[in-house]
Amino acid sequence: MKYYLIPLWLLLTVDGWAQEKTPYIMPRFEGPFRLDGILDEPGWKTIPSFPVTMHIPTVGAEPTERTEFRVAYDDNFLYVAGWLYDSHSKGIQELTFKRDDFGSADWFGIALDTFADKENALAFYTTPSGNRIDATNKNDAQGDDWLNLSWNTFWYCATSRNDNGWFAEFKIPLSSLRYQDKNGRVTMGMHLNRRIARKNEYITYPLISNQWGFTSQFKASQMQPIVFEHLRPRTPVYITPYVLGGLSSVPQLNADQTAYQLQHTATWNAGLDMKIGITSNLTADLTINTDFAQVEADDQQVNLTRFNLFFPEKRLFFQERASIFTFSFGGVNQLFYSRQIGLNSGQRVPILAGGRMVGRIGRWDVGILDMQTKATGSLSSENMSVVRLRRRVFNQNSYIGLMTTARLGTDGHANVTYGVDGIFRVYDQNFLSVNWAQTFDRLTTEQTQRNGRMPTRRFFDPARWQVRYEKRILKGFGYDLSLSQAGRNYNPGLGFESRKDYMRFGDRLFWGWLPGKNSVLLNHQVSLYGYAFLRNSNGTAESVEVSPGWDALFKKGHRAQVKVRNSYESVVDTLTLFGIARIPGGQYRFQSLYGLLATPGNKPLNATLETEIGRFYDGSRVSLSVRPTWAISRYLELSSYLQWNRIRFPNRAQQYDVTLAQIRMKVSLNVNVSTEALIQYNSVAKLVSSNIRFRYNPREGNDLYIVFNQGTSLETNPFDSVGRPTQPALTDRSMIVKYTYTFVK
């Protein structure tokens, strides 16, 4: 018998995917254009309509409502129009005015893979209310965080409605898209999509298989190639100054420490942001005296683990082509985490100045960032920089890249990292990912030397690596397997790492079904999820979980999941959870039952319910969370979140009831004026926090924000253990007014 070895480079060029679609030559829009949503311009009559099909609930079926999509362009703008007819026009849902909010409304939009990289896209959507929704789509719509709604750019839309349905048109500046041209010829990927909310029906162009689940219709790799001819690069400059004023009040102990008195502080500030189009595919952002006062408050979290919590980035400055800076080791572990800049333990650190450049140079995706922070309190001034390079290799879904980061403090601290990564489509939907990184930290090295112990494995101790192999499909047998390790001195100064000093392997084996048009299920699967964390020092297990489960997505929009968790935790020292519960060192094996049920998000009133019941270390836990949302009208939406945990350790006579609650109200007068109020309660911190944010946005880049924040303590003991007065009910209060105006050159 003879054996043949296939070279890896040859295997990586095998294309088991669907054949490349024939590029569509985009037509030019002729004549005048008026943005009003009426769609009566003579120019639209010469633009052909795309053939549309149903994607959900039955892929490839004829849509139940007449739908027409048209797209055209001229030298300056991309024009998009949707004729969204509806035989029951009173059933059209338009329950939101708010920017970047789909809500439970009908919607229509376009997504563009502007660099034709088959991985990333920009998305532009609207609802019958005429609100704007813009977002970025990364990693070919894979994973839990593929959609980023925090990204905004300059574009315009208008809608209209009558007894025949609703109608929408977009006017998107080509300078807002970023693309690469070759002698005036530009190739992109395109996808058009309509949702009829009351039917949970999605209508798309082009026809896309549903084998990847709900996100199939948003995959950049499946978009229709389109070609623009004779495009001239546009490189505008956006200059956005801001002014800010505010008043804050914080209780302070008086000189003899007998009582608290409110200390009032008035502040004012000014700064400048600039966005410069260097070329059609390369953009620079500059900032001076940056302030993020307008950013919405983080959702509070209760930590029932022994590891760090992760909060997503919401600041607009870091959103432009943010996917370029992604260097992931799986889950929340990242070599670069932008919230390390300008934030420390949730508190703002002043940013003196900074800049970033993103785009494409030749065949390379490029991201460069440099920020300088101001010394504040015990924190020294720091310079933080990142360089990221990435390019396609072998086939359309394979990439290699490298990244370096540096965090340099005026106090002498220095942290430098480098990383090399690659993702390779080996065959069909089989992907191999490889990551390697090393960190060099001056203080860590000096401390090791002072302790008289030098690493015996110097190369791997400050290193982190991962190998992952996955099959991206929901039908039949699938897998997502990884092996990774983090050395004991691995310390990414600008990254995020939930654990330290371990080796890990996991993650999931499953079998999935796509039942067909006669089933109430869109897709469902049984899976075996599991992982093991081993200590590098002796190879013993630190954490192990094995969880068989089943989850399903229904055609009407319901979702259900059930999982049996079998857990093992090895605790070396006493473990403190949520600041109060103490678990002695030892080995713990425990089981629990987890369940999730979500009602359709396309309904004005919807909710998600999660529960987990079972053992918890050497005790028991009952956890319940519910997240209801009620879109009362397009002017008002109410939502809330309640998480309740009942934790008991009878052997130690310990019992805890941990509650986290929030109420959010969104009020919009129209697409330009909105107010959002968020009230949160944390029983662990015994704190109620309030955040109210008013926004007036007459046009993109021109904003007035009024932000009010207050913290209220529920501590009932007026004195501490030594007789001093405790902090009063009011922990802090502030009101900030910020105005920005953008000049375009």
Image (cartoon, rainbow, N blue to C red):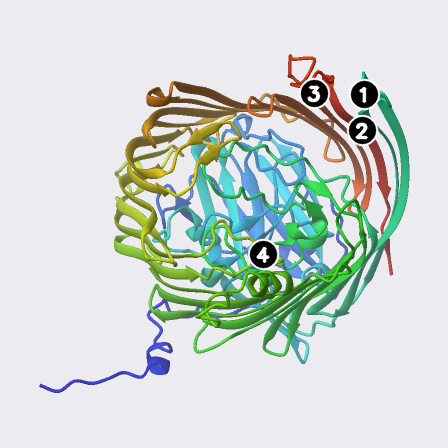
Q: Give the residue at x 64% y 16%.
A: 714
- Crowding at dot 1, Cα within 10 Å, few <14 / some 14-19 / many 20+, comes out as few
Q: In the rendered structure, are the residues bearing label 3 and label 2 in contact, judged by CB atoms less than 8 Å apart?
A: no
Give me the residue at 59% from left, 45% from top: 312
The residue identified by callout 1 is 257
State the residue position of label 2: 734
Earlier in the chain: of badge 4 and badge 3, it is 4
* Residue 659 drawn at (x, y percent): 51, 22
**Tag on residue 712?**
3
Q: Residues within 10 Å of mark 3 (few under 14, many from 20)?
A: some
Q: Is residue 569 visible?
A: yes
Residue 451 shown left or right of residue 624 in the figure: right
**Residue 40 visible from this viewpoint:** no
Q: Secondary structure at mark 3?
A: strand
Percent of width and height locating residue 216: 42, 52
Q: Position of residue 678 (x, y in %)?
A: 66, 26
Q: How far apart are labels 1 and 2 at the CA level?
A: 24 Å
Q: Is residue 333 toward the left or the right of residue 250 in the image?
A: left
Q: 225 or 539, which lies in front? A: 539
Asked if residue 652 is positioned above or below residue 29 in the image, the reply reads above
